[in-house]
Each structure stands twice: as structure tokens, then as C-alpha cells.
Image: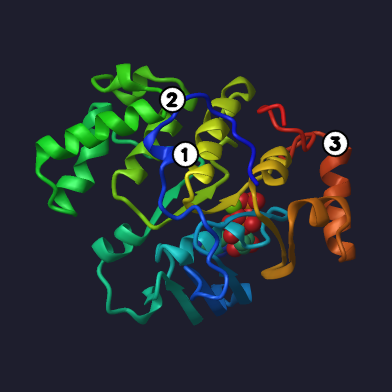
Amino acid sequence: MKRIYAKGKSILDEGVNCGKTSGLPKIISIKGLRKSFDGNEVLKGIDLEIDEGEVVSVIGPSGSGKSTLARCMCRLEKIDGGTVTLSGVEITSGVHDNGDIARLVGMIFQQFNLYPHLTVLRNITLSPVHVLGIPPGEAREQARELLAQVGLEDKADARPGQLSGGQQQRVAIARALAMKPRIMLFDEPTSALDPELVGEVLEVMARLARSGMTMMVITHEMGFAREVSDRVVFMDDGNIVESSAPAELLANPSQARTRQFLQRLLAGPGKAGSGVSAYGF
Ligand SMILES: Nc1ncnc2c1ncn2[C@@H]1O[C@H](COP(=O)(O)OP(=O)(O)OP(=O)(O)O)[C@@H](O)[C@H]1O
Ligand SMILES: [Mg+2]
């Protein structure tokens, strides 16, 4: 049972996919995924299945292929072998357009990638109107609702440059949710933020997790991985080394490579920090 972090009720709390669906087809099914850059194989046959409503944190050293995996899952990279099937749609078959992919999966990056010249509201309504064909009035109404959910209802008319990093990342999350994706991928969503802004973004993500959204989160926030995820996956050198419940993998990993990584993470500063999240988990 996930902890409840946020006060009050929201549409993020009312997801329909709260129950796990083991036994049913997986919402994410990756088989034998291979990807090379200039002859350098960075994904060496990844197999990964994720249940609907499951929250999976992906951890691993720099260069292990975490971002490449996420990018292949929303077709930002062309793959060299294997398949990625999302909600029964094999996105790697080449027959689906970008709109199809956008309906299935939303991705949040370390950099927020908001359009600087557009207001927050326009940033959020752009794709729903132009890709999904939602009437502008309806898209604006939905955008205001989503902004309220991420605590930014008063920022609809601001430009991204007028917002803090944490606020911009929350807008990016609202923008992704406006496409009503089945799956959300996060690639180190808090790594570019000042430490004091990390918590507000993790809070929004924790609420989204609680709503039943299927999420894959690449993170160095071990507190988030431990408290919010259903499962933690450890990647190293283009492979999934180990995958299990957070308490098991983080406290008692079965593989030596996982142990080494976690020991280094806890040992010192650097990118991975102390392993204790600013969220205060
Ligand atoms: N566009 C690219 N061209 C060439 N090599 C790339 C490209 N993108 C990634 N790589 C290489 O693929 C490997 C995996 O990179 P990736 O970004 O997936 O790692 P990561 O696990 O996300 O690392 P980090 O924790 O630093 O973000 C690295 O060796 C990287 O240099
Ligand atoms: Mg990365």
C-alpha cells in the first residue's frame, strides 16, 4: 500500500487503474531490446514487463543505458532489435504515427523543454488541440484543472521563464498529462533542480503514482524509489541486473554489482547525492 502524501482530493487521486492486474497482459512489455550507437551496444537485450498501475524505479550507474531505454520506449530512438509493446500496441513495428505514441506514453526529462515564448496555459493546450483535436475551450479547461492538481492554478498566464525550476517541471508534468497517456516515463525529473525544489516535484509524482498511473521513473532519489515504487530495477552496462521490491533490492540486493552501486551511492556526494531525498523520505 502506498503512503498518502498529499492532502485533499484531486483528479490525480481518482485514477481508474488503482488495482494491479497481474495475470492480464502487461501494459509495458519489452522483449530483447537492443540499441547501439556507432557499434557501441548500450542496450544488450532488455526484457522488462510492467503491470498496469505499477510504479517502477530504474536505478543504475551513469552510462548504463537508463535514458536510452526510456527514449526507445517512446520511440525517440530507433532500435536495433527486439520489441516494445505498450498497452498492446507494438510501437516498434513502425506502423504507428507520433500521435499514436503520444496517446500512449508521456515523458518527462531532466530539462523541462517548455516553449519559452508561450504562456503556461498554451504550453499545456498545444498538443491536445493540435494532435488530439480537442476543442480549444475544452483543452483550456482541462489545462486549468491539471494546473490546479500540480499546485499552479495561479500561473496559467505566466511564461516559463517567470517560474522556478520546480514550477516549470510541474508544468511539464501537467503538459504530459494533458495528452491523457496510459504510461508516464520520468528521466531524472529532479536532477536539474535546486535541492529545496526537489520535494514539490516528487510530491506531485507520488500523487500521480497513488492515482494508479503506470510509471517508470529513472531516479537517484532513493527515498522516492523506496517509498513510492512497487519495484526497483537495477541496470548496469546495458543489462537489467536485478529487479525486485524496493525493500528487498535496496536493503538486501542479490547481485554484487547492485551492492557495489548502492554502497557507492550511500558513501558520498556527487550526482547520486547521499541517497536520501530532499523529499524527506
Ligand atoms: N546519441 C548518442 N550517441 C552516441 N552515444 C550515445 C548516445 N546516447 C547515449 N549514448 C551512449 O550510450 C550509453 C548509455 O547512455 P544513457 O544516456 O542511456 O545512460 P544513462 O544510464 O542514462 O546515464 P546517466 O545516469 O548519466 O544519465 C553511454 O555510453 C552514452 O555515451
Ligand atoms: Mg540518463
Measured along the vertical axis of the image, is residue 165 above or below residue 135?
above
Q: Are marks 3 and 1 in contact (CB under 8 Å)?
A: no
* Disc on the earlier residue, 3 or 2: 2
Name the quadrant of the C terminus.
top right
User: Could you give the CA–CA distance between mark 3 and mark 1, rounded to whole angstroms?
Assistant: 25 Å
Where in the figure is residue 97, as x and y percent of width and height?
25, 69
Cα separation, mark 3 vs mark 2, equals 29 Å
Label 2 packing within 10 angstroms: few (<14), some (14-19), many (20+): many
Q: Amino acid at mark 2?
A: Gln
Residue at (40%, 62%) from the top-left corner? 76
Q: Amino acid at mark 3?
A: Gly
Q: Nearer the viewer, mark 1 or mark 2?
A: 2
Point 49% across, 76% down: residue:
25
Q: Residues within 10 Å of mark 1 (few under 14, many from 20)?
A: some
Q: Nearer the viewer, residue 132 or 269?
A: 132
Q: Work out whether residue 30 or residue 114 is closer to the camera in this orientation and state it.
A: 30
Label pair 1/2, CB-CB below 8 angstroms: no
Q: Is residue 140 left or right of residue 22?
A: left
Asked whether the residues under the numbered discs 3 and 2 touch, taking CB atoms below 8 Å apart as contact, a structural biologist would say: no
Q: Residue at x 45, y 20 (%)?
A: 164
Write down the residue under mark 1.
111
Q: Is residue 41 visible?
A: no
Q: Secondary structure at mark 2?
A: helix
Q: Which mark is residue 167?
A: 2
Q: Which residue is mark 3?
A: 268
Q: Earlier in the sequence, mark 3 or mark 1?
A: 1
